Amino acid sequence: MRNIDFQLVRNFLNLFQNYYPESLGLGLIVNASWIFSSCWSMICPWLDSDVENTIKFLRKESDLTKYIDPMNIPQRLQGKHVNFRYFLPTDEDQQMIEIFRQDQKGKQFNENNYQQAMTKYIQITLKWAQNEDNSNLIIERNKSCRNLLNAYENLLPYVTTRIHYHRTNEIHEPIFEMTYKKLSETHFDDVTYF
């Protein structure tokens, strides 16, 4: 306790309650250790009563249901929300990463296409914003938007990898598999980019 920098704590609390009071709607502290309660008793006089009232101490996990719907409380805290289970990248994911990293020509090609599509989209959007008669520009802008989305989708395997949600099939982006299949079936020099 004697090693605590109370001036820093006081400044932090001052910033928090005076500049960001709406940041804390409710603070729930479950099973706080005895050392924390003594620190809290020293800090409380420095706090505004409104801020102090937003912090609640709970003795057991089951008290959380007074403040949070049990469907949103993880099972490890006696709630009913399904515990998160992380799926590690598979060997296929690792192979995909290696092949995508080796394909420098493909990455450069798709980066250039994306830059061109982005530039064209911005130019058309500026024309559309400055023009009153813009019925043709709306069609052209929508087409440019689709081209930009397609260019980004083609670039995606080169700038990111499949994530947990791909592995659990919550997100399905076939571009990863399509690009991987195309690259793994051919030699990099034989690949035609479009």
Image (cartoon, rainbow, N blue to C red):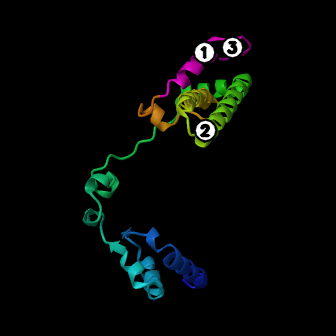
Q: Secondary structure at mark 1?
A: helix
Q: List x then y, in percent, for residue 148.
A: 59, 31
C-alpha separation, residue under disc 2 versus residue under disc 1: 34 Å
Q: Relative to 56, is 191 on the left or the right? A: right
The residue at 60%/38% (across/down) is: 125
194 versus 68 height, above or below: above
- Residue designated by label 1: 182
The residue at 47%/32% (across/down) is: 166
Any mark on residue 99, and which? none
Q: Please, what is the dominant secondary structure of the magenta stretch?
A: helix
Q: Is residue 136 magenta?
A: no
In primary-sequence order, the first of circles 2 and 1 is 2
178 versus 133 height, above or below: above
Q: Secondary structure at mark 2?
A: helix
Q: List x then y, in percent, for residue 67.
A: 29, 65
C-alpha separation, residue under disc 3 versus residue under disc 1: 8 Å
Region of the chain picked out in magenta, as a range: 173-194
The residue at 50%/72% (across/down) is: 20
Q: Where, by quadrant of the figure, is residue 25 drawn?
A: bottom left
